[in-house]
Image (cartoon, grey):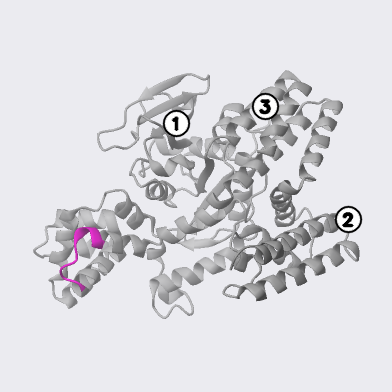
């Protein structure tokens, strides 16, 4: 990769400290894309992490472990390592239920973070970082979390600056992308929290290239509270997600509804044949009785019926009322449905596959580009931190040479997208939206804003927009806008070239 070559070439031309930083950048370039899951406490982050990994390993109840950063990465042997602030490591066995122990048995004030290694295929392509939730009621946890994410300043009587401490920064600094978890109400400071989080993890602004959000616990939305939902919970969740997307954009590419609890149970082995049998028994109840039971959790577990209360409580903990209702409907429509088919039906109802698909489009498909852009940001920051003007200039010149090469166009596009999304380059709203669309989609139809159009139409539109942006760059644009416009012009031209040259 050209960015890796740049780091190798520069290592002999910079100070030992900067060269060590470049070595860390090279290590990250060779590692899987690191996606940090962020959000407020009780937003269901850890449940969603378990669903994405496909294994119930992250503790979901409030405990010591949930107040620390935990990195889930691929390993040939399953193990947990506690990493202390002084660099020491302590290996910890998984609990009997296969999860990281909620209580670690050590002084957590001296813990930097937790490393969890799993023989899991998902983690071969993506490292998932579970972060402490913002808004904890525990004062010490609040302070640790906000300092960790850069959302709060150190008190005046503390030594040092507002920056994160080194161990905390090292624990999360590898995250090149972010999955932000919200629930029904996007709070006024969610924008600020998302910005602080991404600044702390990736040292660059969040944008539609490296950030998406999910509306978790979609089943808890009251459909009557959402105009246009027609009483349908999922339709209400979709409408609410679109509203939240407009609130959080351009910091995120999209907001997708998901039901993390159902996804976790269906994907991580939590849903069993015994659960399927219990749902069959519930499906045999009179409809009036079942509908009354599903009014609330208390009624569902306390109602007198043939299904034991303990079994119903277990179903409630795994699926909640919405999942139970969905599964019962599936059994009634297909009485012979197998436990495996019922699990797949629940997985479909959770919305997890749509989230995974979006992760694939936004993150996985352009992982190398995201990592390279983050690496360039790190290289630039390291050069500026050196305090040596000559070193800074050498690094700056090398980056400019790199970005001038045709193969670096994707990096220039990501850079332009970040500048526009962060507001560093002010563009008219319609042009900003076009830059975001072209730069944040992998599908050509989506890039051109013409999904479903045929090849000739797409090619003609790409060539027309390429010409328009070239004219804009030369006439009427500010210098900063012109730099972005030249990049967008080339993006359209390359799309036109690809459509013209590749077979239909």
Taking depth in this image into account, of 175 and 102 the one nearest to the observer is 175
Give residue 115's mark.
1
* Residue 378, image quadrant: top right
Left or right, 334 with reference to 68:
left
Residue that label 2 marks: 479
Badge 2 or badge 3: first in the primary sequence: 3
Label 2: few (<14), some (14–19) or many (≥20) C-alpha neighbours in 10 Å: few
Q: Magenta stretch? A: 334-342
Taking depth in this image into account, of 101 and 277 the one nearest to the observer is 277
Residue 114: x %, y % from top left: 45, 31
Residue 258 visible in this rendered orientation of the protein: no
The quarter in which the C terminus is drawn is bottom right
- In this rendering, the answer to whether 224 lies above or below 237 is below
Left or right, 308 with reference to 419:
left
Label 1: few (<14), some (14–19) or many (≥20) C-alpha neighbours in 10 Å: some
Residue at screen point 80% across, 35% down: 398
Residue 288: x %, y % from top left: 18, 77
Identify the secondary structure beneath mark 1.
Answer: strand
- In this rendering, the answer to whether 52 lies above or below 449 is above
Badge 2 or badge 1: first in the primary sequence: 1
Residue at screen point 72% across, 18% down: 16
Q: CA distance from mark 2 to mark 1?
A: 46 Å
The quarter in which the N terminus is drawn is top right
Residue that label 3 marks: 21
The stretch drawn in magenta includes residue 339? yes
């Amino acid at each position: 990769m050209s960015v890796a070559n740049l780091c190798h070439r520069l290592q002999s031309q910079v100070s030992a400290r900067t060269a060590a930083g470049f070595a860390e950048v090279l290590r990250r370039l060779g590692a899987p894309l690191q996606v940090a899951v962020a959000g407020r406490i009780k937003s269901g982050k850890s449940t969603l992490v378990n669903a994405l990994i496909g294994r119930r390993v992250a503790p979901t109840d409030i405990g010591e472990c949930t107040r620390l950063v935990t990195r889930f990465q691929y390993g040939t042997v399953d193990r947990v390592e506690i990493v202390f602030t002084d660099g020491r490591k302590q290996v910890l066995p998984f609990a009997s239920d296969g999860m990281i122990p909620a209580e670690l048995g050590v002084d957590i004030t001296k813990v930097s973070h937790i490393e969890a290694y799993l023989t899991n295929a998902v983690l071969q392509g993506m490292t998932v970082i579970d972060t402490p939730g913002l808004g904890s009621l525990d004062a010490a946890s609040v302070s640790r979390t906000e300092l960790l994410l850069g959302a709060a300043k150190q008190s005046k009587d503390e030594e040092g600056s507002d920056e994160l401490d080194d161990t905390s920064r090292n624990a999360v600094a590898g995250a090149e992308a972010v999955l932000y978890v919200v629930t029904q109400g996007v709070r006024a400071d969610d924008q600020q929290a998302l910005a602080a989080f991404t600044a702390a993890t990736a040292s660059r602004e969040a944008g539609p290239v490296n950030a998406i959000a999910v509306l978790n616990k979609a089943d808890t939305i009251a459909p009557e509270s959402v105009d246009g939902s027609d009483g349908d919970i999922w339709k209400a969740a979709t409408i609410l997600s679109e509203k939240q997307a407009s609130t959080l954009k351009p910091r995120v590419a999209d907001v997708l509804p998901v039901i993390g609890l159902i996804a976790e149970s269906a994907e991580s082995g939590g849903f069993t044949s015994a659960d399927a049998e219990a749902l069959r028994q519930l499906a045999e109840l009179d409809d009036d009785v079942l509908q009354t039971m599903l009014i609330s959790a208390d009624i569902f577990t306390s109602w007198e019926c043939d299904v034991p209360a303990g079994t119903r409580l277990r179903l409630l903990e795994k699926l909640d009322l919405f999942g139970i209702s969905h599964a019962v409907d599936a059994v009634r429509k297909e009485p012979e449905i197998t436990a495996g088919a019922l699990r797949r039906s629940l997985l479909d109802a959770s919305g997890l596959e749509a989230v995974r698909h979006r992760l694939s489009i936004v993150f996985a498909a352009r992982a190398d580009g995201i990592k390279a852009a983050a690496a360039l940001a790190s290289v630039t920051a390291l050069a500026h931190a050196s305090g040596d003007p000559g070193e800074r200039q050498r690094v700056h010149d090398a980056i400019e040479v790199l970005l001038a090469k045709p193969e670096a166009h994707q990096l220039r596009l990501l850079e332009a997208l970040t500048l526009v999304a962060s507001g560093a380059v002010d563009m008219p709203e319609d042009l900003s939206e076009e830059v975001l669309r072209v730069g944040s989609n992998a599908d050509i139809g989506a890039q051109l804003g013409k999904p479903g159009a045929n090849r000739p139409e797409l090619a003609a539109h790409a060539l027309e927009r390429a010409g328009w942006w070239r004219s804009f760059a030369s006439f009427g644009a500010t210098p900063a806008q012109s730099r972005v416009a030249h990049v967008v012009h080339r993006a359209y031209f390359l799309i036109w070239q690809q459509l013209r040259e590749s077979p239909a």
